[in-house]
Each structure stands twice: as C-alpha cells, then as structure tokens.
Image: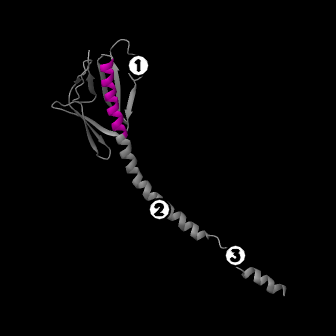
Amino acid sequence: MMKKKLMKLTKKRTKRAFTLIEIMVCISLLSLIGGLFAYKAKDLFSVYNFRSDKRKLINALELARHLSVSYQADVETVITKEKLGYDLVISTDEPGLEDHNMLFKKISFTHIDKIAYLSDKKKEDPIKILFSSSGWLFPVGTLQIRSKGEEVVNIDLGINITSSS
C-alpha cells in the first residue's frame, strides 16, 4: 500500500519550469539579435558622431566671428591635422583678451576624417581663417569636411558680417 502511494506522488506532474535547452536557445537567439543590432548601431553612432563634430566646427567658427565683431579684434582660427583627427585653436593678438575662456583652447574633432579648403589656390595644413574686426572673413571660400564613412559636407565661409560702429 505504501509503495502505491509513493508511486502516485512521483508520477504526479508538478508545474514545469524551463529546461536548460530552452534557456540556451533563448540566450542564443537574444545574442544573435543583439549582434545584428550592434552591427547596425555602429554605423548609426559614427554618423551621429560625425554630425556632432560638424556642428561643433561650425559653432567654433561662428564663435570666432562673434568674438571678432564684439571685441573689435582680429581673431584667427587655425585648423591642424593631428593623429586622431583635427584640432582647432581660436586666438588673437589683441591685448586684454588673453584671459577669455574660449581663446587659445584646443577644440578636437576626432570623427572628421579630412578637412580641405576649396578655393582657387591650394591650401595646405594648417588651415588659417582670419575674422577681421570689421566683420570680414579672410580667405573667403569653402571648407569641405569628410567623414570616415565618406559623407561629405561643405561649409561656406563667405559670410559677410556687418557691425555698427
């Protein structure tokens, strides 16, 4: 009698949990989907980083232009090629502006693969752009920036700024 009772207890099905095989299949499917997403996300992140560097470069050039007009000083930007990308330094020889928090600081662009100056004359590294105190920009032309993914953007430097004296 006792043996029959034990048999009934062992044959009774309990609530079944996941088996090891089912868990392994779920993990492998999730890792496969995650790997595909990571492959596509890499391209998305590189495009985002390039566009972020492009916006940072445009903002730095606009800052130099605003500094030249507001302080009535000649402001020079120098773009140089470095190992990990490009660096831009905003500087002036105007006395009294040495302590400005944005002058003489290096701004790095690590996701821009190439910056070229497009004009009639070939410009070599470093690229120098002078924003005059009267609001003019020298030399007038176009900066072409290229990403590692071959996205090309042209930045027009022919902006005429008029300031009231």
Q: Residue furthest front?
A: 164
Q: Which residue is mark 2?
A: 32
Graded by Cα atoms within 10 Å as few (under 14), some (14 to 19) or many (20 or more), the crowding at tag 2 reads few
Discs 2/1, front:
1
How far is the residue under mark 2 from the one under mark 1? 52 Å
Q: Is residue 94 left or right of residue 119?
A: right
Say which of 160 and 16 sits in front.
Answer: 160
Does 129 appear above or below 73?
Answer: below
Q: Residue at x 79, y 82 (%)?
A: 6
Q: Residue at x 30, y 20 (%)?
A: 69
Q: Is residue 75 left or right of residue 35?
A: left
Q: Are marks 2 and 1 in contact (CB under 8 Å)?
A: no
Find numbered disc 2 in the image and state the secondary structure of the residue it sits on. Answer: helix
Residue 72 in magenta?
Answer: no
Residue 53 in magenta?
Answer: yes
Range shown magenta: 52-70
* First-in-chain label (2 vs 1): 2
Q: Which residue is mark 1?
A: 100
How far is the residue under mark 3 from the one under mark 2? 33 Å
Q: Are marks 3 and 1 in contact (CB under 8 Å)?
A: no
Q: Amino acid at mark 2?
A: Leu
Q: Which residue is mark 3?
A: 14
